[in-house]
Amino acid sequence: MYQTVKRITDYFILLLFAPLWIPALGVVAALVKLTSPGPALFTQKRVGRGGATFTICKFRTMRTDTPGDVPTHLFENPDAYITPVGRVLRKTSLDELPQIFNILKGDMTLVGPRPALWNQYDLICEREKYGANDILPGLTGLAQVNGRDNLTIEEKAERDGYYRRHMRFGLDAKILLLTVINVIGHSGVREGRAAGLPRG
């Protein structure tokens, strides 16, 4: 029942804040396009509800010659691939803005487990233990506001499972508020093998 309510709430929130995110999409797209060769958007295959795959949309933060379908934490030196504008977008999470279209399409929701890469088998299998693969992935989630890149795979899956069991409006509102606070404070963002953990 609440998952239906979530969908309605998603559309209401996106409509309410449309005067903010629509211009932001245009400005960021122009910045990406004008400051590095290649398209403004980057697409990648991710795992959604029930293990079904879908194509996620992000603003491109890396050079076009960056190896595809490789989590950033596996790069020895991710700074060699991240563009100057991309570095700012990743710190502020503005690179995630195009996923609004994934939400409108129904592939994602505002709050839920971050969608795993199709080849992040360790995270997918760990989430299966908690039933976290049974709900729509989110733009933000409990793991993102409670450690994010500082969490191990097991810790992320455990938090995703907690959210699955306690999913409700109050928890979603708290996660959205903490997301805004964390984005402003750049909390929990780490890159490369030094971080040892994937960035959602």
Image (spheres, grey):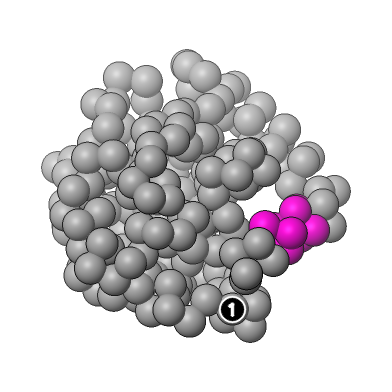
Task: State the extent of the magenta-drawn residues as a range.
Answer: 7-14
Above or below for 42 versus 155: above
- Rendering coords of residue 94 (x, y %): 57, 48
Q: Residue furthest top?
A: 37
Residue in the image at 48% along x and 22% along y: 36
| Foreground of the two, 166 or 74 | 166
Q: Quadrant of residue 67?
A: top left
Viewer can see residue 72:
yes
| Foreground of the two, 118 or 43 | 118
Residue in the image at 54% along x and 49% along y: 108
- Rendering coords of residue 5 (x, y %): 69, 66
Q: How many marks?
A: 1
Quarter of the N terminus within the rendering = bottom right
**Overall secondary structure of the magenta stretch?**
helix
Viewer can see residue 83:
no
- Rendering coords of residue 180 (x, y %): 61, 68
Is 8 within the magenta?
Answer: yes
Q: Secondary structure at mark 1?
A: loop
Q: Residues within 10 Å of mark 1 (few under 14, many from 20)?
A: some
Q: Is residue 162 left or right of residue 95?
A: left
Above or below for 35 versus 183: above
Residue in the image at 60% along x and 64% along y: 3
Is 19 within the magenta?
Answer: no
Which residue is the site of mark 1?
168
| Foreground of the two, 36 or 52 | 52
Q: Is residue 159 left or right of residue 153?
A: right
Mark 1: amino acid: Arg
Q: Is residue 117 left or right of residue 177?
A: left
